[in-house]
Image (cartoon, rainbow, N blue to C red):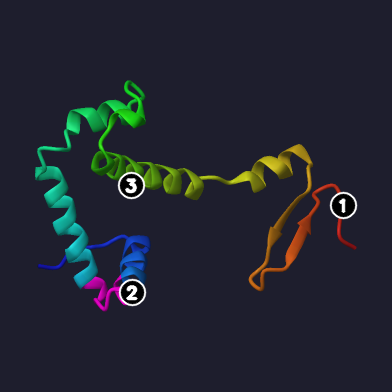
Amino acid sequence: MPTRIDGELFGAAKAAGELQSRSAAQQLDHWARLGRALEASPRITHGAISKVLAGQDPYDSLSDSAQAVVRVDWDEQISARIAGLDFQDRLQKAGRPWTEADAEGLAVVHDPGINPA
């Protein structure tokens, strides 16, 4: 059955699969089975995980397995926030310079206060 997979997730599956001699599809299947097993595990309670993610309980109160689930969620949240960051507009409006790497990894300084000739 065809399913759409996020490009970043597919890339991660491809890289992880190469280390385990699996195709990207096989790695995704493996991860899905692990996720299903984790959700069915009586050692991991979704209520406890939800409380930690909501900031109501400490991370250290969870089992190692439940902490792994929380870390995956945190990684996804962090990636989404990073993808949504755009400081260039803020810096330009404030007239402040910034530096970024170009396609070759070389530093490029942008200074909105300097007009190129």
Q: Residue furthest right?
A: 117
What is the quadrant of residue 24 in the picture? bottom left
**Label 3, label 2: how far apart the Cα atoms are:** 20 Å
Regarding mark 2 in the picture, which secondary structure is present there? helix
Q: Which residue is mark 3?
A: 72
Identity, as a three-letter code, of the amino acid under mark 1: Ile
Residue topped by disc 2: 19
- Of the 4 image quadrants, the one containing the C terminus is bottom right
Relative side of 94 to 39, left or right: right
Count up the numbered dots: 3
Circle 3 — which element? helix
> Is 19 on the left-hand or right-hand side of 111?
left
Residue 48, given in percent of the width and then of the height, sits at 22, 28
Q: Looking at the image, is mark 2 or mark 1 earlier in the sequence?
A: 2
Where residue 58 appears, x then y in whole percent? 35, 25
User: Would you say the residues marked 2 and 1 are in contact, meaning their CB atoms lie under 8 Å apart?
Assistant: no
The N terminus lies in quadrant: bottom left
Residue drawn at x 33%, y 43% as measured from the top left: 73
Q: Residue at x 24, y 43 (%)?
A: 65
Crowd rating for badge 2 (residues with CA inside 10 Å; few <14, some 14–19, many 20+): few
From the viewer's perspective, is the residue at label 3 or at label 1 nearer?
3
Per the rendered image, the range of residues in magenta is 17-25
Q: Tell me where residue 102 appears, x and y as whole percent.
A: 67, 67
